Structures are given as C-alpha cells and as structure tokens.
Amino acid sequence: MKLKVLYSIIGLILLSFTSKPEIVWSTMSTDFGIVTQGEKLNGNFKYYNHSNTGFVIENIQVSCGCLVAEWNKDTLAPGDSASLSVIFDTQGKTKLHTKTIAVYSSHGLYELTLKADIRKD
C-alpha cells in the first residue's frame, strides 16, 4: 500500500513538470526587420486561456515611451482568446531597437518583445 502511494506522489510530481502552459501566446516576439524612421509599427500578440480559471491582465509596463499598449481589461474565460496590441512609434529613432512589454497577470509575468532596425530615408 505504501508503495502505491509513493508511486502516485511521484507521478503527480512528474505530471506537474510536464503539464502544458495555462496561457499560450501565438508569439512572444515580433521582428519588424528594416523599417523607415517615423513609421508606427503595430505588434499584435494573441493569447489563449487553456487554464480552468479566468485570466486577467492586471497591468502592463513598456520599456519606452515610444510604445503604447492596448488590451482587453475584462476577465478572459477558460477556452477563450484575446489580443494585446502594441504600437511602436519609431519617430526620432535609428539603428536596431529591442523593446520589451512586461505583462503582469493573474497567472504570472510574461515578457514580450518588439524589434526593429530603423533607418532614415
């Protein structure tokens, strides 16, 4: 009997390490490649709630004032999906830029990135 309990506990521990993520992002990074200075780039990050509880984005912090994020502030039900949109204004910027978007949620922290190689005309 003790051996069965031990195997059950070990099985549950292993299962917890191999379970799929509860929140799945279509992508966590967008590379716009070479762009012209002054363009406004739109990064779209779709996410899916595969958990058995509601998902809420509580706050978003962007790494630069050149980013503006828009997201659904309502609770995302299990099985549903939504999108987070980030506009990157390249005005006054040149060279390679990598910007981060920290997504604070009811299911933890997610870090998304946008990258662009910005060139003058």
Image: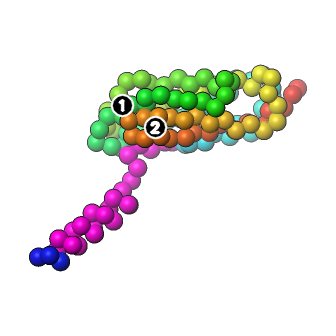
Amino acid, disc 1 = Leu
**Frontmost residue, 3 versus 40:** 3
Name the side, left or right, on which 9 lies relative to 91: left
Q: Earlier in the sequence, mark 1 or mark 2?
A: 2
Can you say whether 111 is above or below 4 in the image? Answer: above
Give residue 76's mark: 1
Residue 14 point in image, percent of width and height:
33, 65
Residue 11, numbered circle: none
| Chief secondary structure of the magenta portion | helix
Report whether 113 appears left or right of 104: right
The x and y percentages for residue 62 are 60, 30
Q: Amino acid at mark 2?
A: Tyr
Q: Residue at x 77, y 22 (%)?
A: 91
Q: Is residue 1 above or below residue 71?
A: below
Identified at 66% across, 23% down, the residue is 65
Q: Which residues are magenta?
A: 4-26
25 drawn magenta: yes
Q: Considering the numbered disc 2 on the image, is that residue within a helix, a strand or a loop?
A: strand
Relative to 19, residue 95 above or below:
above
- Residue beneath label 2, please? 47
State the image coordinates of residue 57 (x, y, percent, origin top left).
43, 30
- Quadrant holding the N terminus: bottom left
Residue at (47% x, 34% y) in the render: 104
- Whether the residues at callouts 1 and 2 have beta carbons within 8 Å, the answer is yes
